[in-house]
Image: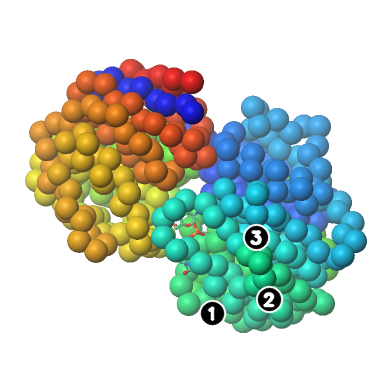
Amino acid sequence: MDKIRIRGGKALRGKVEISGSKNAALPVLIASLLTEKKCHFRRVPNLQDIRTTLKVLSHLGVSLGSESSLNQNQVELTAAIPASSDGFHEAPYDLVRTMRASVLVLGPLLARFGRAKVSLPGGCAIGARPINYHLFGLERLGAEIALEGGYVIARAKKLQGAKIVFEFPSVGATENVMMAAALARGESILENCAREPEIVDLARALRAMGLQIEGEGTETIRIQGRDSLNGCTHEIIGDRIEAGTFLAAGLGSGGSVEVMGIAPEFLEAVLVKFEEAGATVERKPDSIVITANGRPKATDIITQPYPGFPTDMQAQFMTVMTIAEGTSVITENIFENRFMHVPELSRLGAEITIRGNNAMVRGQAGLVGAPLMATDLRASASLVLGGLFARGETIVNRIYHLDRGYERMEEKLAGLGADIERIR
Ligand code: UD1
């Protein structure tokens, strides 16, 4: 299994190109199931989770076109799928267990074919992560849903547009139900929707496929369902979490980093916190520059649905706080059990106390390198940051989690002057 070796303590300087967003790409690729026409996607990040998605899609009968090359960040998909013999299109456990987002095939399969069978998801071990909001929304559109043998089995003759008020603005549930409503009869009104930039990107892709959809990025999304959709050409937005991670690296290492190819408004809640922590932040049209001014200052954060501070940046921000002047409180409101990076950061000399969903971080003058074990995706990134900020050598083991969500992270960090290498 691959590891990463870091010799820390260097101030990072320079520019880094941000990849396409993983969390935007997953639903957008899956939306190709809604049409038999060809869909061409650009700026698709070359990541393990994307390869898993392509496997799920190809298992469902979607064909990969000649222009598909993840090395060149392009994918061409055609879902000219005949109805299966028993009428069910199935996403099996073996494929779904490694990636929770596979459950997003449920909405489009059900809407187009009237039947779908999807294994209950696995993915990162960050809390229970049920899919009840997804199922609630699909039921409101007229689906009959049963849970059998670890599978969700969904049936509907033809989905009917409906008004759906979500209990919580879940990203995945909003996406799943948006895709289902696209092929439902009549209008759907979705309320208390997630407002994340990834939702807006999915709406743009659906619009490119000919859907009439409005309100994405607000609490209420209106969709006029259609009998069929066209193909599309769509470029994925930049990855705000990858960008935020590199900005955290710039700040915590005492350097200056520019992240290229990212809209600053996607990260506003994080940028404000970097400023509160003492950084100078410059917002440009398509890039962000962060410059450290000495040691970071203690800053509290509370994770919230967008536009609040993203849970996917919580671990990385905490690592910066481990070397800040003063004590900060980090509150995790989205997922239970999302402090798995804490015992590992402690191995570097960080002082962190957890009480419920709060972590109190007493900033230290410095960290010292140590061997570490990556647990989930964003936790892994926080450990790499810890290694960059610590004196001496850090080895981060089990980095397959990192490879699920960061494209060539060690190469990009080396480009900023980090002493980092992958050991195979
Ligand atoms: C997405 C992101 C993930 C991010 C999260 C929150 C993708 C592929 N993943 O995950 O990186 O951390 O948004 O920004 O885009 N919940 C339920 N029932 C449901 C659905 C969710 O109780 O049916 C709960 C979850 O357990 C969690 C909270 O709602 O506590 C938020 O989950 P959700 O917004 O759905 O996150 P994901 O779409 O899974």
Answer with left or right where residue 405 lies relative to residue 92. Answer: left
First of labels 3, 2 by sequence position: 3
Please report the residue visible at 54 percent of the width from the left and 72 percent of the height from the top.
Answer: 133
The residue lying toward the viewer, choosing from 375 and 25, is 375
Q: In front of the other: label 3 or label 2?
A: 3
Question: Residue under circle 1?
Answer: 165
Question: Residue under circle 3?
Answer: 119
The residue lying toward the viewer, choosing from 125 and 405, is 125
Which x, y percent locates residue 264?
A: 41, 45
Amino acid identity at mark 2: Ile
First of labels 2, 1 by sequence position: 2
Amino acid identity at mark 3: Ser
Please report the residue visible at 62 percent of the width from the left and 52 percent of the height from the top.
Answer: 96
Determine the secondary structure under disc 1: strand
Which x, y percent locates residue 191?
A: 53, 76
Answer with left or right where residue 157 lies relative to residue 73. Answer: right
Local crowd size for mark 2, using a 10 Å CA cut-off: few (<14), some (14–19), many (≥20): some
Please report the residue visible at 71 percent of the width from the left and 70 percent of the height from the top.
Answer: 153
Which x, y percent locates residue 356?
A: 24, 64
Determine the secondary structure under disc 2: strand
The residue lying toward the viewer, choosing from 220 and 388, is 388
Determine the secondary structure under disc 3: strand
Answer with left or right where residue 355 lies relative to residue 264. Answer: left
Disc 2 and disc 1: Cα gap in Å? 19 Å
Dots 2 and 1: beta carbons under 8 Å?
A: no
Which image quadrant is residue 93 in? bottom right
Counting labels gives: 3
- Taking the image as drawn, is residue 172 in sight? yes
Question: Residue under circle 2?
Answer: 145
Name above or below for residue 252 compared with residue 303.
Answer: above
- The numbered disc on residue 290 is none
